[in-house]
Image: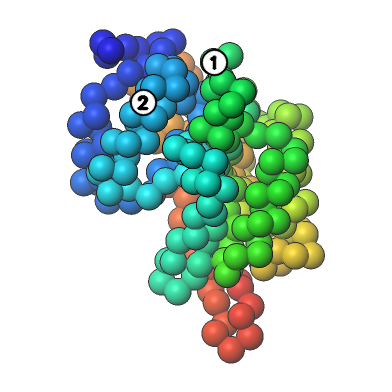
Amino acid sequence: RHYGGYPSYNRPEQYLEAIKNSGIDFLVTSNNHSMDTGEEGLQRTLKKVRENNFASTGTFDSQRDRDSIRVLDVKGVKIAVLNYTYGTNGAYPSQSKKWMLNVADSALVHDDVIRARKTNADIVLVFYHWGIENKQSPVAKQDTMFHWAADAGADLIIGAHPHVLEPVTYYKTASNAKLDSGIVAWSLGNFLSNQYWRYTDAGVILNISIEKNIATGKMRL
């Protein structure tokens, strides 16, 4: 396929090499543009992601792959990472291949968070593609999706898609979570962009420090 811009993106695979060289090693690949070049494009992207030695979640090559929870070991703290998108601009995988892409719904998110909690993970992190573009505060649908994850036991919830910064807030976690207070970052803005709308020239890298008591297993933010 030819390279393409808005509304159906198709980019050179060399971007992956550049991202890797910048120090990033884990990608979340479920977003509203995951299906821009169809099922074939989604699968080719995933193939190239793996060829460039990234770990990832959000898009998958089989049902078994989708059902596998990614648990990262970061300096002795084990973090389960889940990723979902609110939708894909109308182009979805076929009914028999729904496993390709994590499209958020209450049952899927709830069940995945519960399964992630049953692994040896210290922290469950849910990364959402959600919200309204160019809006600086979360909307009702984001709050609903937030509760799907938080009420099931997620410790941290991070969002993207609005292209602008939205607040970071603490929340009281569910009884099965490891952190007493969780954090939801509603939108981190644009990491890299040439958008010209007001506030789209800003983005943040969120640094989170987690302390683990080896004796008691207790976690602290």
The residue drawn where x is 56% and y is 35% is 99
Q: Residue furthest bottom?
A: 215
**How many numbered circles are shown?**
2
The residue drawn where x is 28% and y is 12% is 1
Indicate the secondary structure of the residue bearing disc 1: loop
Q: Amino acid at mark 1?
A: Ala
The residue drawn where x is 71% and y is 49% is 111
Q: Earlier in the sequence, mark 2 or mark 1?
A: 1
The quadrant in which residue 90 appears is top right
The quadrant in which residue 10 appears is top left
Using the image, determine if residue 75 lies above or below residue 25: below
Q: Amino acid at mark 2?
A: Ser
Using the image, determine if residue 134 lies above or below residue 71: above
Marks 2,1: beta carbons within 8 A: no
Q: CA distance from mark 2 to mark 1?
A: 24 Å
- Residue 57, percent from left and from top: 47, 44
Indicate the secondary structure of the residue bearing disc 2: loop
The quadrant in which residue 114 appears is bottom right
Q: Nearer the viewer, residue 12 or 139?
A: 12
Task: Kindly report which numbered mark, 2 or 1, lies closer to the viewer in this rendering.
Answer: 1
Q: Residues within 10 Å of mark 2 (few under 14, many from 20)?
A: few
Residue bearing the label numbered 2: 193
Q: Residues within 10 Å of mark 1 (few under 14, many from 20)?
A: some
Q: What's the mark number on residue 168?
A: none
* Side of 107 relative to 161 (left or right): right
Q: Residue furthest front?
A: 96
* Side of 74 relative to 32 (left or right): left
Residue bearing the label numbered 1: 91
